[in-house]
Amino acid sequence: MPTLRLRTLGSLTVLAALGALAAGCETSTEPDAAGSAPSSAAAASPTVDLAANKKKVCEAGLQAVKAGFGGMADDAIAQIDKPVSKAEEDRLIRAHYTTIVTGLKAQAPQAADPAVRTAFENLAGAIEQRMADKKPMEVDEPSLTKPIEGFDTACAN
């Protein structure tokens, strides 16, 4: 039983680390070497600052991902000293997944960048599929790897 909990903790730590990679979500709005502001935002839409929108949306999405995966890690650590039933463990995991999905779905429509919107929707969809599975504790399931990488890529500089 302790080996399973340590494996779960290790898996959660890996997922939390992957989520933390999305911290590269911040985009630079500093002038380039020629002294002009980045042209992609101005050329794409005169009414929406794409860089600022991307930064805001990605930061909010990252907070949801951190809250969910961080909560899973905290629960796994707490369960080392005070184990809970499998049913309670699954309930906690589902609650954290729900936190992530709710946060991503709230931010996806706010994204002016279609790549960011798609990455948020893909990760939320993959997590919803995990929640529909009978074994949500298997958080190291490879089905989340690509959506997490997509989230990181869409929000990275």
Image (tube, grey):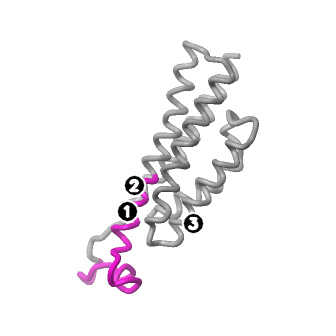
Q: Main secondary structure of the magenta part?
A: helix
Element type at mark 3:
helix
- Give me the C-alpha separation between circle 2 and circle 3: 16 Å
Q: Position of residue 38 (x, y in %)?
A: 33, 79
Q: Nearer the viewer, residue 135 or 5?
A: 135
Give the left or right position of residue 53, taking residue 142 as reference.
left
Residue at figure coordinates x 51%, y 54% from the top left? 104
Q: Is residue 80 above or below residue 44?
A: above
Asked if the residue under mark 1 is in contact with the one under mark 2, i.e. CB atoms within 8 Å, the reply is yes
Q: Position of residue 147 (x, y in %)?
A: 62, 56
Q: Nearer the viewer, residue 131 or 141?
A: 131
Query: Which residue is identified by label 2?
Result: 59
* Crowd class of label 2 (few under 14; some 14 to 19; many from 20; radius 10 Å): some
- Sequence-first tag of 2 and 3: 2
Q: Amino acid at mark 3?
A: Thr
Query: Which residue is identified by label 3?
Result: 118
Q: Nearer the viewer, residue 129 or 39?
A: 129
Place residue 86 in its image quadrant: top right
Residue placed furthest toward the right: 134
Query: Which residue is identified by label 1?
Result: 55
Q: Is residue 62 above or below residue 109?
A: above
* Crowd class of label 3 (few under 14; some 14 to 19; many from 20; radius 10 Å): some
State the extent of the magenta-drawn residues as a range.
32-61
